[in-house]
Amino acid sequence: VRVAVVGLGPIGVEVARAVLARPGLTLVAAADVAPALAGRPLAEVVPDGGAIDLVVDGSMDAVLARGVEAVALCTGSRLESVGADLERCVAAGVHVVSTCEELSWPWEAAQARALDDAARAAGCTLVGTGVNPGFVMDRLPLQLAGVCVRVDGVRVERVVDAGQRRPPLRRKVGEGLTVEEFRAGVAAGRLGHVGLAASARLLARGLRSALAQFDETVDPVLDSDGRVLGVRQRLSAATADGRPIELRLQMSVGAPQPHDRVVIDGDPPLDVTIAGGTHGDRATVGAVVDALGRMARAPRGLITVADLY
Amino acid sequence: VRVAVVGLGPIGVEVARAVLARPGLTLVAAADVAPALAGRPLAEVVPDGGAIDLVVDGSMDAVLARGVEAVALCTGSRLESVGADLERCVAAGVHVVSTCEELSWPWEAAQARALDDAARAAGCTLVGTGVNPGFVMDRLPLQLAGVCVRVDGVRVERVVDAGQRRPPLRRKVGEGLTVEEFRAGVAAGRLGHVGLAASARLLARGLRSALAQFDETVDPVLDSDGRVLGVRQRLSAATADGRPIELRLQMSVGAPQPHDRVVIDGDPPLDVTIAGGTHGDRATVGAVVDALGRMARAPRGLITVADLY
C-alpha cells in the first residue's frame, strides 16, 4: 500500500517512522501545512529518518498528486477541521486512516452521510482510530466478545498517570488548575476527554444494537491542597436492548496503579486487565499502521473500528 | 446466514443453541451420524430447545440438500476425520467453521492445498476455530498486537483447573495415572494438548513471518503421592526473523489461580491477564458463532483465524 502521512506533529512523525518499518506499507509522501516544515527533507523531520528520500509537501493536493493509495491523516481532533481533507481524498479515491477523535464515531455530524455515500461511490474507505477511542474502550471489548456466546453488559476502566505523558495531555486534564477553572474549562469544552460517548456507540453497534441513552460526568481529581491533578470521567449507558455499558476514565498526575480493565458480563464472562495500561501515544501509532494494512480488504465507505475488525 | 450444525456432541448442541440466539444467523438444519440421534426432533436433543421445529438429519448430504450457506462442523479433532465432510461442503459451495483442532493450522496436511484450491474455486471459506487453538494463544495476542508499532516477541501462559471441566478433558490431561502411564499416553498421542504448535504457527503468520523452529515438552503435574494431576506443556519457538514465541499450558486438577496471560514484548509492550482464564467450552461455542457471522466477508479458501480477524 502506497501511503502518505499528512500532519507531522508528534503522532504524525511517529506514524511516518512506523510506516517505513512495516512490511506491506510504502511511504511515498508526507505533508504539513506549517511553513517551517513544508519543503524540508522529511529525513530532517522524522527522528532517525536519515535514509528517507522525500521532501515534505505543503498541502493535501500535492500529496494526492503523488499516486498514494492511503493517507494517514494526523491533523485535527474535530471532524470540521479534517472534513475538507477527507473530501479531497474521497474525490481522489484514496483511503484515509485518521487519528481525528470525532471520526471514530462520525454519525453525529451532518457531513457523515454525504462522506459515506461519496466514499462508497469512489471505492475507498475512511476510518478514525487510535487508542481511546479506537481500542481500549471499544475495539478491545468487542474483540474479546468474539468468544462470548452472549454479552449482557460491558464495563471498561482506564487509569492513566498523566505525569508520564506529554505536556498537551497534562494540560487537557487540567493539571494545576483550581476547581473553578477546571469546571469552566470543562463547560467550555477545553478540558477532559471527548471520546467516551463515541466508544459507547461503537460498543453498542458491535453488540448488534444501538445506544439508547447515556449519562456522562466529568470531575476533577484533587491533591491535598485542592489543586487539580487531573480528570475523572464516567459514562453510564445502555443499549437499545437494555444491556448496560459503563466506561470510567481517570487521567491524573500520579494516578496510582495505571491500568486498563475490560469486564464482560456474559457467557462466558471475561475479566481482562492490561497491567500498566496501554500507552496512549505509542498504541495510537500502532493502531494507525494496523488500519492502513487493512485498507485493501476493508468495507468501503465511512466506517468505524467496529466494522474494520 | 442459513446455518447447519453437524455433530451434536456437547459442543455441537451448544453451538446450535447459540446460533438460534444470534441475530443474523438462522438454524436451518442439524445432523449427527449416531443412530440414537438421527431422525429425532432437534428440540429433544438441544437443552431448552423446545421451540425448535427441526428433525436431526443423519448425514452431511442430507444437510447440504437443505440449502444451507454455512456448516458448523463439530465432529472430530483430526483433519482426517473431517476431510470427507469438508470436501462435500466445498463441492456444494458451503462455508465451514469447524472445531477440528487440526484445521486451525491445516498446512501440515497433504490435503490442505487441494482443499484451499477447491474452496477458492467454489467461492467458499473453510476455517478452524476454538479457544485454544483459535483464541488465547494466537488470535488474542494478534488482536492485541494490532496496537503495537513493533512486536519483538510473544509469551502466552494458560493455567486451567481441569477439576472444573468435563470428564473428557480430565482424561485427556491424565488425571489419576502413574508417571509411567502418563509418559506412555503422551508417546502414543492419547494425552496432552495438540494445539501449541498450531498456535505458534498462527502467531508467526500474523506477525508477518513464519515459524523457523520450535521445541515442545510435555510433563506431568503430580500430587504428593506421585499420581498425575494433569499436564504441563511448553513450546519454545522463534519466527524466521528471530522473534521468540513462548507458549506455556498447564491443565491439571486443582491448578492454583487459573488464568490466561499474554505478554507482548514490543512497542508499546502489553501485559494482559484474563482473571480466572477463558472458559474452554463456552468460549469455543462463542468463537464458532462469531466466525459464522464473519463468513460473508471472509477471504475465500482454506483460511485460519489469523486471516479471518
Image: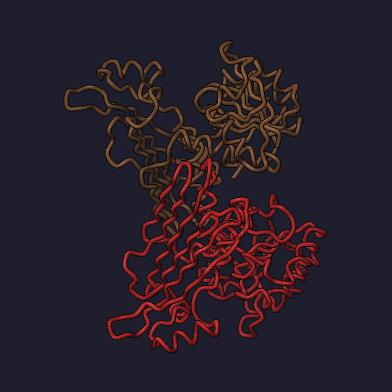
Chain colours: A brown, B red
Q: Please identify the residue farthest to the right as the structure is shown.
A: B121
Residue A149 seen in the figure: no
When the figure is inspected, residue A242 is found, relative to residue B12, above or below; the finding is above
- Residue A116 lies left or right of residue B129; in this view the side is right
Q: Quadrant of residue A174?
A: top left
Q: Residue at coordinates 45% horizontally, 40% vertically from top-left? A: A137
Residue B20 coordinates in the image, percent (x, y) = 58, 61
Q: Is residue B133 above or below residue B268?
A: below
- Where residue B258 appears, as percent x and y from the top left, is 36, 64
Residue A101 in sight from this viewpoint: yes
Which of the pair B156/A182 is nearer the observer?
B156
Quarter that holds the C terminus of chain A: top right
| Residue B157 in the image, given as x and y percentages of width and height | 43, 61
Q: Quadrant of the N terminus of chain A?
A: top right
Q: Is residue A259 left or right of residue B202?
A: left
Q: Residue at x 60, y 25 (%)?
A: A43
Q: Which quarter of the figure has residue B69?
A: bottom right
